[in-house]
Amino acid sequence: MKHSKTYNFFSEFLQIVFGITLASIGLKVFLLPNGFLDGGVTGMALLVGSQFDIDISVLLVLFSIPFLILGYFTVSKSIVIKSILSIIGLALFIHYETFETVTNDKLLISIFGGLFLGAGIGISIRNGSVLDGSEILGIYINDKFGISIGQVILFFNIILFSITAWVISTEVALYSILTYIVTAKVTDLVIEGFEDFIGVTIVSKEYRTIKLAIMKDLGAGLTTYKGSKGFGSKGEQEDFDIIHTVINRIDIKKMHRIIDRIDENAFIIEFDVNSVKGGVLRHYLDKKKNKILPKI
């Protein structure tokens, strides 16, 4: 057990360092040299830094402090500690990195800057850390007033990009919005993964055999509940188990083959799954070892 905890600690540490590296590449190679912004605290630091010639690494740490204080009362202490170290690490990377600018094309700058930054933020969040305090602000306001986290972050960034359009230029603001959209989408993709899950309900007389085959051949957890069928209130009735499971969408054809092999007349209902929380299914669904920030 101790060995496993040590391994998890170093695994999380290395992944957070990798996330910081990707985020700093997005900032130092693409966004900073070209005056483009991202959303959130990072964008706020970039905006102020561009106007007052203050080191962005210093501003990033200073602007993050109020949000980290909020995080102390909103999320776990381990997340706050990891986030403090991650933000300081990002600031140091930005300060000492000397990457060369790879392109002057504004569209490529927006897209690839957002891609690297979003990947870095996503990897950090998956390992229990944040690189941008606006998510913590969203959690705090959601807990206090019930306003959704997405709406809080959106409102925060509307103000930020409006100021950017007024202070710098509308063009920079528009490209910065594009950068933010790419960053947000890539962050979501990294956090949630490429997997797409589907729920399946199966009704069959051969439920025992199908149940064992699903667990053995697909490695999927499942739930069964009692059902009965007949031919009316006085007709012949039969008790059986109804099978309910959630699997990766790419496995659905394999499941069909398994069921057809056992009972080609089985009744199958399929439906999209938006989220799954807790339960035995979690072992199969959640490949993410430590999704500590479910609210973000």
Image (cartoon, rainbow, N blue to C red):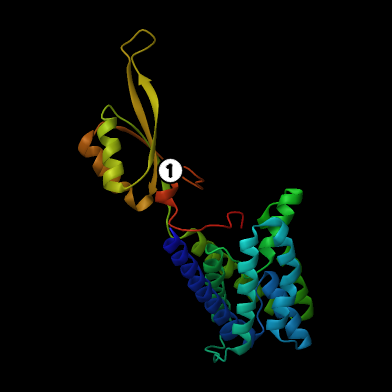
Camera-side residue: 266 or 288? 288
Residue 209 horizontal side relative to residue 186, left or right: left
Question: Which residue is depicted at the point 71% across and 71% down?
Answer: 64
Q: Is residue 172 visible?
A: yes
Residue that label 1 marks: 280
The number of numbered discs placed on residues in the rendered structure image is 1
Q: Is residue 155 visible?
A: no
Question: Which residue is depicted at the point 41% across and 49% down?
Answer: 283
- Residue 116 pos. (x, y %): 53, 76
Question: Which residue is depicted at the point 30% across and 47% down?
Answer: 218
> In the orientation shown, which residue stands out farthest toward the left?
261
- Residue 47 pos. (x, y %): 73, 79
Within 10 angstroms of label 1, few (less than 14), some, or many (20 or more) residues? few
Relative vertical location of residue 233 with respect to residue 257 in this rendering, above or below: above
Residue 40: image quadrant is bottom right
- Residue 273 pos. (x, y %): 47, 45
The amino acid marked with disc number 1 is Val
Relative vertical location of residue 50 with respect to residue 251 in this rendering, above or below: below
Relative vertical location of residue 226 with respect to residue 82 in this rendering, above or below: above
**Tag 1's secondary structure?**
loop
> In the orientation shown, which residue stands out farthest toward the front?
2
Camera-side residue: 60 or 152? 60
- Residue 124 pos. (x, y %): 55, 68
Residue 65 horizontal side relative to residue 129, left or right: right
Quadrant occupied by the C terminus: bottom right
Residue 239: image quadrant is top left
> In the orientation shown, which residue stands out farthest toward the top?
234
Question: Which residue is depicted at the point 70% across and 58% down?
Answer: 138
Quadrant occupied by the N terminus: bottom left
